[in-house]
Image: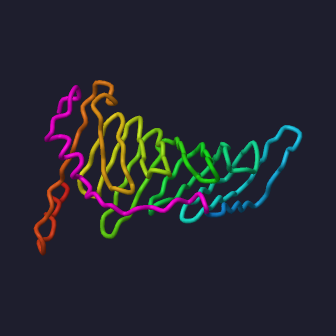
Amino acid sequence: MAASSPSPALAALLLAVLPATSDAQPSRATLPISVEADSSDFDYRNGVLVFRRIRVTQGDASVAADLATATGLEFQNSEWQFDGSVRIVAEGGTLESDTAVVRFRDNEIAFAQVTGDPATFSQQRGEQRAEGRAARIEYQLTTGRIRLTGGAWLSDGRNEITGSTLVYSMSEERIVAEAAEQGGEPVRITINPQSPPGEPPPAEAPPEP
């Protein structure tokens, strides 16, 4: 599959891997933000706050980690660093990573960049489960878009897509792979066959003695 210019067929396939929906997500900006931690250390002289075993919650969105560092306890315009067993939950999806940088804008959890070996995400919608992994995942909570970069892999539970950079919309359940972001590498799609209703999957061959 060529990476220089995506064909209409490729674009249609990429957009059809997961069905689109039109569920609107209300703004969280008017909801209170709760901070819970096992311990905290406020360094007023240097303007640094350190929390251990922390959980930040706003509506249905939350960020939890072993450690968090912030430059102030305000959410109008601030950036927090989370480290160790990072777990971010929003819109029915979950991201897990080693570290994360979370930005708050206008009293709202707006953006998260997570890194790991690899960083992962999953989203369950009914019987369908989307999941992915990459070296870095950027999540725009205000739009519900996830950008996976560095060995990106996405699956809807049956079909798989790999590429240098993939974008997934959690609100629309849609995958987009732009040719210009693949670094000259092709986007690969693996479509696994589905057994007809009522027919069990083929049995695996027994190992040779």
Residue situated in front as seen by the camera: 15 or 143: 143
Residue drawn at x 29%, y 56% is: 156
* Left-right relation of 39 to 137: right
- Residue at 21% over, 52% down: 16
Instruction: Give the percent coordinates (x, y) of residue 145.
Output: 42, 48
Q: Residue 101 vs residue 159: left or right?
A: right
Residue at the image point whose x is 75% and y is 52% from the top: 51
Query: Residue 192: percent from the left, percent from the top?
Result: 18, 53
Q: Which residues are magenta?
A: 1-30
Q: Nearer the viewer, residue 60 or 114?
A: 60
Residue 18 lies left or right of residue 32; in this view the side is left
Locate residue 33: give its quadrant: bottom right
Q: Residue at x 28, y 28 (%)?
A: 185
* Vertical comparison of 175 with 24: above or below: above
Report the quarter where the C terminus lies.
bottom left
Magenta stretch holds residue 7: yes
* Residue sitting nearer the eye, 11 or 84: 11
Residue 62: x %, y % from top left? 58, 59
**Which one is in front, 37 or 74?**
74
Is 177 magenta? The answer is: no
Which SS does the magenta portion mostly show?
loop
Q: With respect to residue 158, does 196 lie above or below?
A: below
